[in-house]
Amino acid sequence: MFSTTTTTTTSNKPHNSTSNNKPRIVILGTGWGGYTLANRLDKNKFDVRVISPANHFLFTPLLPGTAVGTLEFRAIQEPVRTIRGLGEYYQAKARTLDTTSKTITCQDIFKKELFDIQYDFLIIATGNKTNTFNIEGIDSHEGKSVLFLKHLYHARQIRNRILECFERASNPNISVSERQRLLSFIVVGGGPTSCEFTTELYDFIHEDVSKWYPDLKDEIKLTLVEAGSGLLGSFHQSLSEYYLKKLQTRNVDVRLKTAVTGVCDQQFDNTELPFGMMVWSAGLAPVKFVQGSGLSLHKGRIEVDEYLRVPDSKGRIFALGDNAIVNSGELPPTASVAEQQAYYISDCFNNYYYKSIIDNENNDNENNDGTELPLPGMVYMNRGAMAGMGFGGGVMDLTKSDLPVPKITTSGLAAFLQWRSVYLTKQLSYTNMILIPMYWFKQIVFGRDISRF
Ligand code: FAD
Ligand code: NAI
């Protein structure tokens, strides 16, 4: 039978006020995978419940710009509550999974209390977290001078820290060495997150800081550190080289083949780089829930078959996006993959599984593993890759694209215009489709905001 009740472990208040006879789908996460899926599932057929510590969807491609004020935070998020027909949403983290009783234990983000939610079907879309590789000093400085760039609150932390560095450096009682340290910004990792953020920070420094903090501008240092031999490893080599050259001509100190091995409070010799802020985006790692889920993992990601089903879950558990790996393959952890997988799973549930569930209700045997489903497996379509480069620049790589387009690379203004127009048209609400160009216009005409909140 379908789940209709939710039990709580620490409170008498039921977390489930609705009681219906629809199969319950519990979705973990409100990112590209989870939010898209929750939006698309047919709420007339399913009782859709969402659990996530973020009560919004985040449009990650535009996140680096918000960290310096090119865009405002509210313009790149969509509240979960606006999903029409959603059964329930709980602002909480999934903590443990019991596949026998089909129960997820969650922890709310406010009082840290635990509660249980039962599922008929579970979809895991918790994404990944930033990987620190257990490098000494990263965790202890994180949230202060070392910051990540993954969630909206990270962008807010970065923006405040940058402005804190400039305000402190402007104080009359500051020593020269302390001022130089505060004005040194280090970005770690040469992947697209770091590259896009570095160019946004460069624009902010040259367009706004130089206007409002003219005495400081000549002392600012911007360094990008990458352990490998090039930037943007997943892009065509010509674009990686182009990006590197552009950063170098803008006086960004790019240090290739250089790995950060620790963060400490003292400088001992020239192997340490003093900094006022370090932005760390050196790769991805599984979130705690996935790591402790007991499900089979490959490279820290949940193994799924071509239908995105978790093996041995009797077709009850699905995983998609960054936290999933299909047939041990190598689909990249990108928004495009997560979104396409969400489209695929929602279509399967709406059009096929629902009927199959109803037919098999009394056998409790729907969509068993190993069952040949009369469905095609998920096929990923590569739509190319793009990376922004601040105002007026960008790179676009269509060399591996499955779209019927010339297999070319583009850079400069043409790529920038494509990048902005693609991400503008991909917005999920008219509100943001209107707000985003307004903020872009405001930035061009009036500059970025430099207040600390
Ligand atoms: P996410 O979008 O990360 O969502 C995970 C969700 O799970 C979040 O809501 C999170 O709060 C929630 N969650 C975490 N832990 C738990 C838990 N224990 N219980 C419940 N919920 C939990 N990709 C592109 O294709 N193009 C781009 O231009 C691009 N730009 C990017 C820019 C930046 C700055 C970043 C950081 C990433 C970018 N990406 C881009 C990558 C893309 O954002 C990810 O691949 C995509 O977000 C993955 O989607 P997802 O749903 O798997 O995970
Ligand atoms: P990434 O994994 O792509 O890059 C991390 C980089 O950090 C690597 O180049 C690695 O060599 C380097 N690194 C690791 N340890 C280091 C150390 N100790 N010192 C110095 N360098 C170190 O990570 P990123 O950029 O966060 O991207 C994650 C995923 O999100 C990727 O799949 C990417 O494709 C996707 N993404 C896509 C974007 C786009 O298409 N525009 C934008 C941002 C992210």
Image: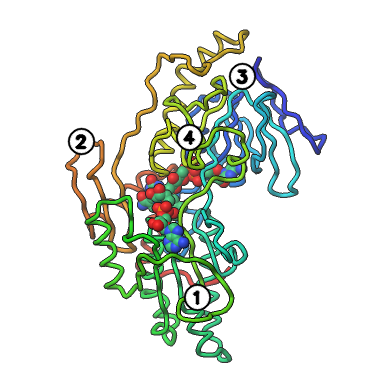
Three-letter residue code for mark 1: Phe
User: In the image, which is nearer the foreground, mark 1 or mark 2?
Assistant: 1
For the C terminus, which image quadrant? bottom right
Real-space Cα separation, disc 1 to disc 3, in angstroms: 55 Å
For the N terminus, which image quadrant? top right
User: Which of these two is toward me, 61 or 333?
Assistant: 333
Disc 2 and disc 3 in contact, CB within 8 angstroms: no
Three-letter residue code for mark 3: Lys
Which SS class for mark 1?
loop
Disc 1 target residue: 275
Q: Is mark 4 within 8 Å of ligand 1?
A: yes
Disc 2 target residue: 404
Real-space Cα separation, disc 2 to disc 4, in angstroms: 26 Å
Badge 1 density bin: few <14, some 14–19, many ≥20, Cα 10 Å = many
User: In the image, which is nearer the foreground, mark 4 or mark 3?
Assistant: 4
Badge 3 density bin: few <14, some 14–19, many ≥20, Cα 10 Å = some
Real-space Cα separation, disc 2 to disc 3, in angstroms: 41 Å
Disc 3 target residue: 22
Real-space Cα separation, disc 1 to disc 2, in angstroms: 46 Å
Q: Height in image: 218 above or below 72?
A: below
Q: Quadrant of ligand 2?
A: bottom left
Which SS class for mark 4?
loop
